[in-house]
Structures are given as structure tokens and as C-alpha cells.
Image (spheres, rainbow, N blue to C red):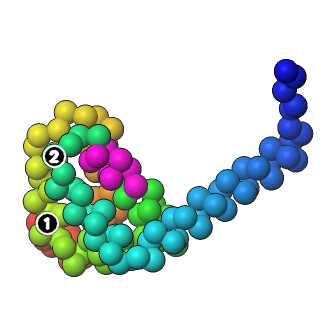
Amino acid sequence: MQRHRLSSDQQTFRIKVMFSKSVFIQATLTASLYFRSVILALLADPDTQSLVETVRLLRICIANSNTADPWVESAAENAKDLLENSIFILNSSTNGKLLANLAEVLDQMFKYSEKILETFC
């Protein structure tokens, strides 16, 4: 079977479509307060792989200026839980990706929310 190679224009179009779908999905998930609450609650999960994926999702959503505010607001409402879960992860995890992504998430949250920053200090 011979594979058909996409032209440069076709590749560009395909990337734009995939990016548009990703942005739409991200915005749809962010719009749900319940979803944001569940994701933030998953930071208490002791399973490393679950934490890696949860923190990865948070990092992606907070890095996007169109979706960051609702995530930060939800985190600020639960700042004490975020603090406790973050301390547990930072003290007990040896997974480099998890630690790096959590550091990025916290860095972004500190930039956006005085309440979160004060809770952590």
C-alpha cells in the first residue's frame, strides 16, 4: 500500500484543524465548574500516573490565557487543599515530570492570584 504524502498547505490546514479542536475542547472543559473542581480534587489522588496527567492538564489550561482565569479562580477557592496536596506531592514524589509540571502550575497560579500566593506563604 502506497502512502499519500500531504502537501505543505494540507499539512498546515491539518495542524490548524487539530489546534482548533484542542482549543475548543479546552474551553469546553474549562467552562464547567464541576469539572474544574473534580480535577483540582484529583490532586489528592496518591496514584502517580493520575497525578502526572492531572497536573499536565492543569498546566495546559493555565498556560492558555483564554482559559487560565477560571482555573485560577477555582484553585483560589480551594487554596488550602491546593497547598496541602502540593506539599504532599513535593515531599513524596520522585517523578521529575510531575514535579516540573507542578512547579509550573504553581508559578502561574502565584502570578495570577494573590490569594493563592498568600495561602502558600
The residue indicated by pointer 2 is 46
Residue in front for this viewpoint, 67 or 3:
3
Asked if residue 116 shows in the view, the reply is: yes
Image coordinates of residue 93 in percent, x first then y, are 17, 38
The secondary structure type at the circle numbered 1 is helix
Neighbours of disc 1 within 10 Å: few (<14), some (14-19), many (20+)? some
Image coordinates of residue 103 in percent, x first then y, are 28, 50
Image coordinates of residue 30 in percent, x first then y, are 44, 71
Q: Residue at x 10, y 43 (%)?
A: 91
Left or right, 92 with reference to 117: left
Q: Which amino acid does label 1 sit on?
A: Asp
Q: Which residue of the protein is positioned furthest toward the front in this rendering?
A: 1
- Mark identifier at residue 81: 1
> Which span of residues is magenta-colored?
50-57
Residue 7 occupies quadrant? top right
Q: What residue type is labelled 2?
A: Pro
Vertical comparison of 95 with 35: above or below: above
Q: Residue at x 41, y 63 (%)?
A: 62
